[in-house]
Image: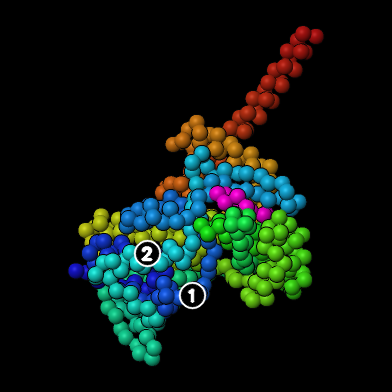
Amino acid sequence: MPKVIIAGAGLVGALNACFFARKGWEVEVYEFRKDIRQMEHVQGRSINLALSYRGKCALEAVGLKDYIVDQGVEMHSRLIHDIDGKTMHRQPYGQPGEHIVSINRRHLNEVMITEAEKHPQVTFFFEHKVIKADVNKGKLTVQHNDTYVDVVGDLILACDGAYSAVRRSLMATPLFDFSQEYIAHGYVELNILPQNNEYAFEPNVFHLWPRGDFTLIALANRDKTFTVTIFAPYETFEKEMYDSESVVAFFKRMFPDAFAFLGAEHIEETFNRIKPLPLVSIKCSPHAFNGKVILMGDAAHAMVPFYGQGMNCGFEDCLVLSDTLDEYNDDIETAITTYSTNRVRDAHVINDLAMYNYNELKDLVNKTSYKMRKKLDLWLNSWFPKKWIPLYSMVTFTRIPYHEVVERRAAQDNFLKKTAIAAMLLVVLGAVRCTLKVQRLK
């Protein structure tokens, strides 16, 4: 039985454990944190996750989709909140019935760990910190307390996040390309509690307060709370939200309807307790090394959260790798080389799309041109569902490879541009014809 060593028991590591357990492989997972199922509070990001089609397909392959989806809250559209605190505009994500699902990160992680452990050949080693990797020997060095041990497997999956220790070990590898970009914006997370045991806002939408250079979002949870996140330039945090009085005044002025439910006390307490957290985008190539090691999830392609594809892309990594191993009958070296070649291109593209989508969320959604294009795309999609799929729908409601999504969008833009030019020419020709006709009549 082949053996896979997984660095990291987060979302991608835990799901990979489920996939390889079902294949019958021996699975060892090494995680530096304690078992999150036994922890009262879990450190790290807690931005609610938006589960879409790619992630659902991966969960379905390990028998978890229906249960996980049932634990979330459906979101069918964006609900745009104007600065007056009263006016709202609805923008459907896709055609009727198409939706994403707001999921609690911790619960999802716990469910996948428990599912993987149902298989006797799966072992999780918590409080075991991955120190480095030896790609030539297929070996990880792991620290537990003050003891260092080497673990060896047929395949190593680096699912240890944006600050991956495995990836750091590879930095001196010839022809390994790596780029890291921190954007000039950070985020702070808050919560809205139930009001009279009911949701404070409509639950089945993605609430959005776009304000040009910064934005507030709110996603519903099953317990009738909302996870609320403000994204803003660090400069805005420093100049507009520098103390308790200023931050309360800022929220009251910019997000009056959200402020009414957040409350001054909660806003003050949150900003006194935590500082804005950073957002990083990471690209690297290749993702596979020496037929033994693969970078997956955030270790390979950490992205900003503005397209809701970080988890979905990571889950799709697991599904694509599993399918590729099946295609090559578990010929590990050939399979992971093929996987890397195909996946690098898609990872780079979705990184760029995620960065672009922040401009959409904080500003473009209020532009007339954006709204008109959105309506046109959905109208054309209703008439030509297979030929014309909007950009957001291709990313969110299909498994069209990300690079092909961009190619199709470019073709759509080109078609609309040519159509607009042709229409303008027809108008001009019509005007000229009318003019000539009038002149002949004279």
Would you say residue 202 sits in the magenta stretch? yes
Q: How is the image coloured?
A: rainbow
Residue 50 in view here: no
Three-letter code for the amino acid on which mark 2 is drawn: Met
On the image, the x and y values in percent for residue 417 come to 59, 37
Three-letter code for the amino acid on which mark 1 is drawn: Glu
Residue at screen point 57% across, 67% down: 279
Quote the CA–CA distance across marks 1 and 2.
18 Å
On the image, the x and y values in percent for residue 201 come to 62, 52
Asked if 416 appears above or below 144 in the picture, the reply is above
Mark 2: which secondary structure?
Answer: helix
Query: What residue is pinned by disc 1?
Result: 40
Query: What residue is pinned by disc 2?
Result: 112
In the rendered structure, are the residues bearing label 1 and label 2 in contact, judged by CB atoms less than 8 Å apart? no
Residue at screen point 65% across, 72% down: 270
Asked if 305 appears above or below 440 in the picture, the reply is below
On the image, the x and y values in percent for residue 7 come to 37, 74
Q: Which picture quadrant has residue 168?
A: bottom left
Would you say residue 377 sits in the magenta stretch? no
Q: Residues within 10 Å of mark 2 (few under 14, many from 20)?
A: many
The stretch of residues the image draws in magenta is 201-210
Precedes in sequence: disc 1 or disc 2: 1
- From the viewer's perspective, tell me whether residue 137 is left or right of residue 35: left
Q: Residues within 10 Å of mark 1 (few under 14, many from 20)?
A: few
